[in-house]
Structures are given as C-alpha cells and as structure tokens.
C-alpha cells in the first residue's frame, strides 16, 4: 500500500472517481492464493478439469478477485481497515491462461456520502477483458 494518509471526509465528493488499476493474475498467483486460503479446488490449477466442467480455462478464485478489487478502495482510503462493509456478486469467472495470465481492471466511484457518520459508499466496476466479473460491487468506507 502507498504511504498516503487516511482519506478525510472533507476531501471527498459524490461522483469522485477512484484511481483505476489493472491487477495482473497468473497461475503462480493462483497457487500462492490456494496455499494461503486453503482453497485448492482443481478448477484453479488443472485445465483439463476446468474445461470438463464447462469453464474456458483455469479460473481465478472468486475470493481472490474480490480481494484484489478491494485494493483500489483500500489505497484510496489510505487504510484497508477503513472498509467497514464490502459485498459483491460474482458474475463471470476470470480465466487465467497458462501463457501470460490475465488481469482484472478495477475502477470506482463514490456514490453517496453520509456526513453524520463520516462514511462514503463506493461502487466498483470490475472487468476482465470485455467481461464484467463482479456485479453490485459496493463498499462502505469510514473516513476521518
């Protein structure tokens, strides 16, 4: 995470765009995530199995995708601990080809502000290629 300070409520406005990021994902990323999370489902590392169940290739873990996308909010807020609520719907898998891997593109917008509680609601757009991979991706951020 960058060395920026925690976001101040007075510096945030509705409609504000968060800095967009492209986050790479490779097969090595999936192996590391499987080890850390305990999710060793075969569809995340074996092409034949993934294809046999109708997937286009090995796919990224949904929780990895959700967590990676939250990085955009955490860096904008200045502290991941400021994210007090976060949810999404998984709309499409993120295929991760052996050669070159893949990436997710994440952008966000402040949609509402609560002055009394000093909170911002942020909506994210998360895509891989031309496909929307997370839907209704929203977070509530506690600001100073």
Image (cartoon, rainbow, N blue to C red):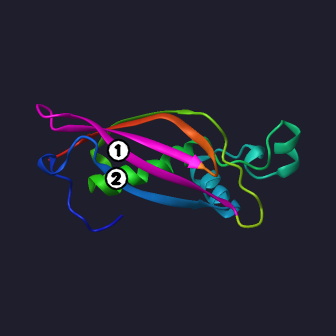
Answer left or right for 37 relative to 43.
left
Q: Does residue 87 sit above or below 75 in this rendering?
A: above
Residue plotted at (71% across, 67% down): 100
Secondary element at image label 2: strand
Q: Is residue 26 above or below residue 40?
A: below
Say what secondary structure mark 1 lies in. strand
For residue 82, side relative to residue 28 (left or right): left
Nearest to the observer: residue 35 or residue 19: 19
Q: Is residue 117 magenta?
A: yes
| In the foreground, 108 or 53 | 108
Place of residue 121 in the rendered image (x, y in percent of width and height, measured from the top left): 30, 36
On the picture, is 120 further left or further right than 26? Answer: left
Give residue 49's quadrant in the image: top right
Which label is found at residue 125?
none
- Mark 1 = which residue? 109
Which part of the image, by quadrant, shows the N terminus? bottom left
Q: Which residues are magenta?
A: 101-127
> Residue 85, image x and y in percent?
34, 34
- Mark 1 or 2 closer to N-term? 2
Q: Is residue 61 magenta?
A: no
Q: Are marks 1 and 2 in contact (CB under 8 Å)?
A: yes
Task: Identify the residue shown where x is 53% and y is 54%.
Answer: 105
Give the residue at x 32% y 67%: 2
Q: How crowded is the residue under tag 2: few (<14 C-alpha within 10 Å), some, or many (20+)?
A: some
Rendered view: 69 above or below 91: below
Q: Residue at x 21, y 37 (%)?
A: 119
Q: Which residue is mark 2?
A: 18
């Amino acid at each position: 995470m960058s060395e920026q300070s925690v976001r101040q409520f007075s510096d945030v406005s509705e409609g504000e765009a968060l800095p967009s990021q492209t986050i790479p994902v490779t097969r090595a990323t999936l192996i590391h995530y499987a080890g850390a999370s305990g999710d060793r489902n075969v569809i995340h590392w074996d092409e034949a199995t993934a294809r046999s169940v109708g997937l286009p290739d090995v796919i990224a873990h949904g929780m990895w995708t959700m967590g990676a996308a939250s990085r955009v909010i955490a860096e904008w807020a200045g502290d991941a601990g400021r994210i007090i609520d976060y949810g999404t719907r998984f709309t499409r898998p993120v295929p991760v080809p052996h050669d070159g891997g893949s990436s997710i593109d994440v952008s966000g917008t402040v949609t509402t502000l609560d002055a009394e509680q000093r909170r911002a609601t942020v909506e994210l757009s998360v895509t891989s290629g031309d496909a929307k991979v997370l839907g209704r991706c929203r977070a509530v951020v506690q600001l100073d």
